[in-house]
Amino acid sequence: MADIVPVLTDKPAHVPADRVVDFDYVRPQGLEELGVYRALKQQLHSGPDIIWSPRHGGHWMVTRAEDVRFVQNNYEIFSHEIFSIPPQLQAFKPVPLAVDPPNHARYRAVLNPAFTPKAVARMREEARALTIDLVEGIRADGRCEFLSQFARIMPVTMFLKIVDLPLDRRDEFVAWGLTIMSSYDPAHRMNAQIRVREYLKTVLDEREGGEGEDLLTRIANWRRNPRFESDEETMAMAMLVFVGGLDTVAASLSYIAHYLATHPEQQQRLRDDPSQGARLVEPFLRRFGLSNTGRILTRDFEYKGCLFKKGEMIMVPNDLSAIDERVYPDPFEVNFDQDVKPIDHNTFGNGPHKCVGAPLARAEIQVFLEEFVPRLPQFRLDSERKNVEHCGSVPGFDELYLRWD
């Protein structure tokens, strides 16, 4: 996963010494012992709210929920045009993720129809049927490796249906996506991206002018829009959709499954009343914010005693935002009796760059809570196997072993 340990970058003169923290978002201290969330909180919530790290080329980082929201909302200052840290990781520009308004809207309009309430309602029921089949297939085994036997099957299968790509290549596509997301060597990541781009170019060429309702056909037909400018637009949209559809929901499901495996009383509450599933989606999303993305400063800007300089990078950690005790009392716990609304957390972002696939992600988590949990006996972590967790731009489990009687 982590290819090169980043060297230390010299502190710029305008950065106060008391803001410097040797923090590596790919390899946080205490990861193996504490897990991602507790390791981050231990290192970063005991010091200043805004830090500067000498790792990955040097970058600022906000650590509190209100500051995460502020940066996400103010794209005029904190641009999303470059969101990878270090910037060298962003060999190609994913659209519309790396496009600020006003141009952001034109590309977003191409993607939005795939995630309308009607489309999501249909996919929710397809995900439900698939979830039931998968659970029935593992129940008699008494154990499972959650990622390979569920979390990288159900949501990825739903994604492949949206883009109409072959289901029998699911494992290959997942491997491609994971190579891109987990490599922090710029050359390695670029090579992985080139392989996917070559495949997607063939698909887009074949589908241009078609009447299919799948998302890649919609993207290919952007070439016939009067506002079309270059093939890089369609390629960048296709790449964003491809990579985004292969990893993030699996990561969310892995954390939710781990939580329930270690909280048997709450797991039983859900098993006793599966109708709670829809209401519990937001509390779980609040608890397990995922993405750690960057922004680039468009101008010099002073904020809370820090002078950010034009061209500097700042990290926006949704995972830290999720465990801010100033906003969420007892932040590591999921309160089954608390009413949490989408506006109460930063997990899917804020402002124009809010995650386009959020409606589908919510539906898939709902199905997991309503179908996976009640259909299995009480499950727990498998004490005979070691779980493997990673941090980085999208934290998650690589291996998560569950057992039940």
Image (spheres, helix red, strand yellow):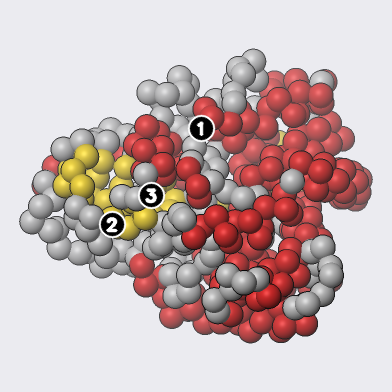
* Camera-side mark, 1 or 3: 3
Q: Of residues 296 and 233, which is closer to you in this image?
A: 233
Q: Amino acid at mark 1?
A: His
Q: Of residues 384 and 156, which is closer to you in this image?
A: 156
Name the secondary structure under disc 3: loop
Residue placed at 43% from the left, 70% from the top?
90
Q: Alpha-carbon distance for marks 1 and 3?
A: 18 Å
Find residue 75 and name its label: 3
Q: On the image, numbered disc 1 is attached to which residue?
A: 345
Q: On the image, numbered disc 2 is attached to which residue?
A: 298
Residue 39 appears in the rendering: no
Horizontal side of 62 relative to 197 (left or right) equals: left
- Dividing the picture into quadrants, the one containing residue 242 is bottom right
Horizontal side of 135 relative to 220 (left or right) equals: right
Residue placed at 49% from the left, 37% from the top?
346
Residue placed at 79% from the left, 55% from the top?
158
Q: Percent x, y for residue 117? A: 76, 41
Mark 3 residue crowding within 10 angstroms, few (<14) / some (14–19) / many (20+): many
Of pointers 1 and 3, the one earlier in the residue sequence: 3
Residue placed at 34% from the left, 50% from the top?
76
